[in-house]
Image (cartoon, rainbow, N blue to C red):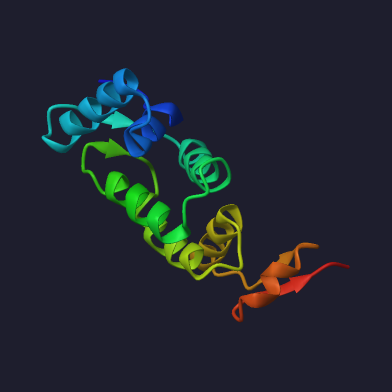
Amino acid sequence: MTLPFIDTNIFLRHLRQDDPTLSRKATAIFDRIERGELRVCTSDVVIFETVFTLQRSYQQPRDRIAEAVLSLLELPGLVLPGKRAYRKVFAHYRQGGLGFADCYHVVLMERWQTKEIFSFDTDFDKVPAIKRRQE
């Protein structure tokens, strides 16, 4: 059985509650997921778009974004391969200093047990466990 895919706009309308019709529909979807009546899948790209839009377009603070998105990711009916890693990703993100994508990269590097990154992004210098290389 294949699962329906849930897109970024469903996350955003639910979290923002900024459109009377679409927000109500989005919240109804998440309510069904929470009650176990519906299982859906999503992707890392959807999570990245959601975080980026909440931060850049709606100027939401990192703590609020982390709390809101994690609460949805923890729903058992929301299938996202590797979703358990997002708790660590958001822990890095809450600290500031790194963008969300870079926080994700730090967690992947931990999982893959690599300590070096080729990057011109000096923000990685703030992560003691990582050595940035640019040669």
Residue drawn at point x = 65 percent, y = 76 percent:
126
Image vertical order of residue 66 relative to residue 126, above or below: above
Quadrant including the N terminus: top left
Residue drawn at point x = 58 percent, y = 52 percent:
101
Residue 116 pos. (x, y %): 69, 71
Image vertical order of residue 2 relative to residue 62, above or below: above
Residue 56 visible: yes
Residue drawn at point x = 40 percent, y = 57 percent:
85
Quadrant including the C terminus: bottom right
Is 92 placed left or right of 36 in the picture? Answer: right
Count all numbered tags in the image, as a single digit.
0
Residue 3 visible: no
Q: Residue 113: name its quadrant.
A: bottom right
Residue 81 pos. (x, y %): 39, 43
Residue drawn at point x = 53 percent, y = 40 percent:
53
Residue at the extreme right of the image, as rendered: 135
Residue 94 pos. (x, y %): 46, 65
Is 36 placed left or right of 64 in the picture? Answer: left
User: Is residue 99 or residue 76 the one in the foreground?
Assistant: 99
Residue 12 pos. (x, y %): 41, 34
User: Is residue 111 or residue 33 the one in the foreground?
Assistant: 33
